[in-house]
Amino acid sequence: MHDLPLLLNIAVALVAAFIGGTIAKYLRFSPIVGYMLAGVAIGPFTPGYAGDVDTISQLAELGVIFLMFGVGLHFSIDDLWKVRNIAIPGAIGQMLITTCLGYVFATYLGWSPSASLVLGLAISIASTVVLLRGLMDNGLLNTQHGQAAVGWLILEDIATVLILLLMPTLASGDGGLDWAGLGLTLLKATAFCASLVFIGRKLVPWILLGTARSGSRELFILAVLATSVGIALAATEIFGVSIALGAFAAGVVVHESKLSHQVSADLLPFRDAFSVLFFVSIGMMVDINYLGGNVTALIVLVLMITVGKYVITLLMGVFIRHPARTFLVVAAGLSQIGEFSFILGQAGLALGLLGKEQYSMILAGALISIAVNPLMYRAIGPVERFLRSDNGFWRLLDRHGDTFALKDRLSDHVVVIGYGRVGHHIVDVLQKLGISLVVIDSELERVEELAELGIPVLYGDAGNSEVISQANLPGARLLVVTTPDDASTSIIVASARAEAPELHIVARASSDTSLSQLYSLGARHVIQPELEGGLQMVRRTLLELGLSLRKVQQYTDAVRSDRYDSAINTVDERHFLNELLRASDNLELVWVPLGENSEVVGKALADSNLREATGASVVAISRQNKLITNPQPKTVLKKDDVIGMIGSQESTDMARKTLSGRDSAAEPTK
């Protein structure tokens, strides 16, 4: 039997993460909690199977690289600049106060100055993954409150990069700055940044563009992986900066490429997979034995991260002029710590600034804070009502008036999920008709486009989060799901039906197998574009053959009601096809212009006796480019009228002779 320790550890870690993530999701916790608890379960400090911490930790380094590369890839100075008035002073003030609070607490526990500083820095920085997911789940990401939180987060990301750069200078043993080491570190970092600016900004986009033009998806993905991992490792080996900083810088460079969005899409599966291993490896390092003897300290640390950071962030509103609800949202989002705290802790551990037991304390605090973070969002409403009860403090905190959630403004509206080609057209039509609507989309560029047009929009993945609940489905007239992915559509339809049992739902299907599933989940109408196109071709073919428009429409409607079944096997389909056949054999529609010598000119339709004289029926009159359908018996026939008559071939031939005064050859209508 082969000895495959690496594959065994990967398999065990992934299976444990899947089980833990599934349980966490079922309990409505963040999946990150499940991943970390899975790591605790297979770690060396719990009974049963123990994974190889070193092996999984090395794989987790790829998770760090992809996480930081993704942060750099989406780094935007423009986003930060839009909310600079709240993000810059708020983030700096909150980080300084929280760091000092953590430093004092760790010092009280007897930690060294360097370890105390690392703990203070670690708890001052929130998790990007957790914050973005929380904002998306609560429909807040595209609001002014959510944008302020994102800008705040960007500044914390920048601070993390700078802290990682400066941490080696703290390794002198007494927590003081090693000025010589600091100068050398800054020199190496400057050289690294300069090489990226003058070489990477030209070389990396050129390589990616050239690879994309080759037409090979595999080569392009390899180029992306080689760029992210290669630059990160080169930063460490050549310039002596951290892997995390190198990966972040690589992402910033690739952001300059026109292919950055494709890079992000191709990197996503690797980032998600290795990020899971990263969180599992973090859980494996949690020493529950140490925590069992320091429960009080752990509780205080968790309260500092959740309640302490919440209060500090909220009080920043006293000094920064912004709506109070913005600070409530930002406070809820930042009252947790995550991957950046882990990265800082790992750096402190590697540099000897932090002990394993102390690092375990940070990890446990992060795990618990992530688990309770959804509760912080639910507390926004109650906390706001409580603060409003003190008018003096509320006026001090809220100096830009009230703001209201989008959900509170929605009623009797249409919810459109997806703003792709199909969704775009639907939104345009609804806008022109003046129908109230809200759009949900997971592409930030589309969300910004809709926001600029003044169209209500929610940012988030309706298939993977609770953002759909922010669209007030019980008060909506209709839900239209245009997403092309059947799995996401099924989840959305099921969630919508559970929240609004009476809501009418129109959904899009991409395959035959999903049609019946979507109907069973509660969709009222399911449209499959490919089959709809084929049905439209059938319709046009029958109309070109001169068959009855009404009967053709009835036939196509019957096919739709039979859920696009291509076999002619229902009673309705056979009935309407038989009527089409009879109509095509026995009836003909002709248009006959009234001749100058026609004996019916000037007579009322009832007095013309056309039905008795010809056997054909008048169904329409075309007069001066206007169509009169089902004309009344008192309608007077005028010169230059074109009369539409329907009947057998014999009767329509007689009608042509009677109306035109000569044998004419009017063509059947197409």
Image (cartoon, rainbow, N blue to C red):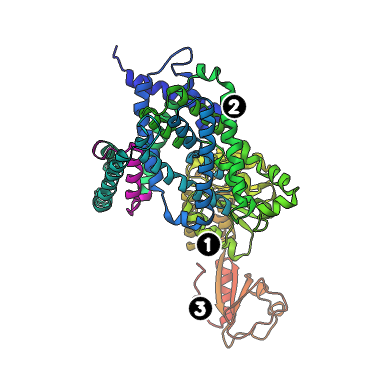
Residue count near mark 1 (Cα–Cα under 10 Å), binned few <14, some 14–19, many ≥20: few
Cβ atoms under marks 1 and 3 closer than 8 Å: no
Q: From the top left corner, tell me how far across and down residue 617 is, in percent.
A: 64, 70
Estimate the spatial distance between the alpha carbons at disc 1 and disc 2, rounded to whole Å: 45 Å
- Mark seen at residue 664: 3
Estimate the spatial distance between the alpha carbons at disc 1 and disc 3, rounded to whole Å: 60 Å
Does residue 464 lie above or below 54 as drawn? below
Residue type at mark 3: give it.
Ser
Residue that mark 2 sits on? 299
- Mark seen at residue 452: 1
Region rendered in magenta: 237-261
Q: How many labels does the image show?
A: 3
Residue type at mark 1: give it.
Glu
Residue type at mark 2: give it.
Ile
Residue count near mark 2 (Cα–Cα under 10 Å), binned few <14, some 14–19, many ≥20: some
Q: From the top left corner, tell me how far across and down residue 468 is, in percent.
A: 60, 45
Nearer to me, 366 or 549: 366
- Magenta span dominant secondary structure: helix
Nearer to me, 121 or 566: 121
- Whichever of callouts 3 and 2 sits on the residue coming sooner in the sequence is 2
Q: Answer whether residue 515 is visible to the viewer in this image.
A: no
**Which quadrant would residue 28 be assigned to in this image?**
top right
